[in-house]
Amino acid sequence: MKFNNFLAFLFTLIAILIVISGLVLEYTRFIIGGDCAGYSLFLVPDEYEVDTEVGKGRLVKFRAINSGGFSDKYEVSLEGPDWAIIKPVSFSLKSEEAKTLFLYLSPNLEAEGKYNINVLVESDCISESQSIEVGVLK
């Protein structure tokens, strides 16, 4: 192998190693959340404990506040009984904007007791949840 060919091979190998190390560094930064720095969300219910009656509706408001430095798009879901519904199910907020979410409770006739309802708001970088306790009376 000629010296010029050896140098070309060596520089090509070094360039490939630099590219691979850069990709590994970028992937590691993505996995540990480095690309999500500066994203933040607060989720606050109007009430943490709510009482309602069987067969009567009740509305509980949640405030979602984008306290981060970037706009973001969110998906909303809830864990709880099937007579609890959250709206909207998706929304976008610019930095420092807020949105009101509406949790509608309409317990059926067999629903007497205590229930924990968890509202979850997620984006590509954020996952925030807040629980409330609902007492259903006859």
Image (cartoon, grey):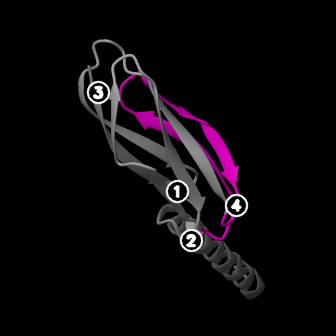
The segment highlighted magenta reads: 68-96
Q: Of circles 3 and 2, which is in front? A: 3
Gap in angstroms between the C-alphas marked 3 and 1? 32 Å
> Circle 3 sits on which residue?
136
Label 4 vs 2, first from the N-terminus: 2
When the figure is inspected, residue 114 is found, relative to residue 97, above or below; the finding is above
Label 2 vs 1, first from the N-terminus: 2
Categorize mark 4 by other alpha carbons within 10 Å: few (<14), some (14-19), many (20+). some
Label 3 vs 1, first from the N-terminus: 1
- The amino acid type found where label 3 is placed reads Val
The numbered mark at residue 71 is: 4
Q: Is residue 49 visible?
A: yes
Closest to the observer: 41 or 57?
Answer: 57
- The amino acid type found where label 2 is placed reads Ala
- The amino acid type found where label 4 is placed reads Ser
Closest to the observer: 129 or 11?
Answer: 129
The numbered mark at residue 37 is: 2
Gap in angstroms between the C-alphas marked 4 and 2? 13 Å
Toward the right, the furthest residue is 4
> Circle 1 sits on which residue?
126
Query: Disc 4 on helix, strand or loop?
Result: loop
Gap in angstroms between the C-alphas marked 4 and 1? 12 Å
Query: Disc 3 on helix, strand or loop?
Result: strand
Closest to the observer: 131 or 135?
Answer: 135
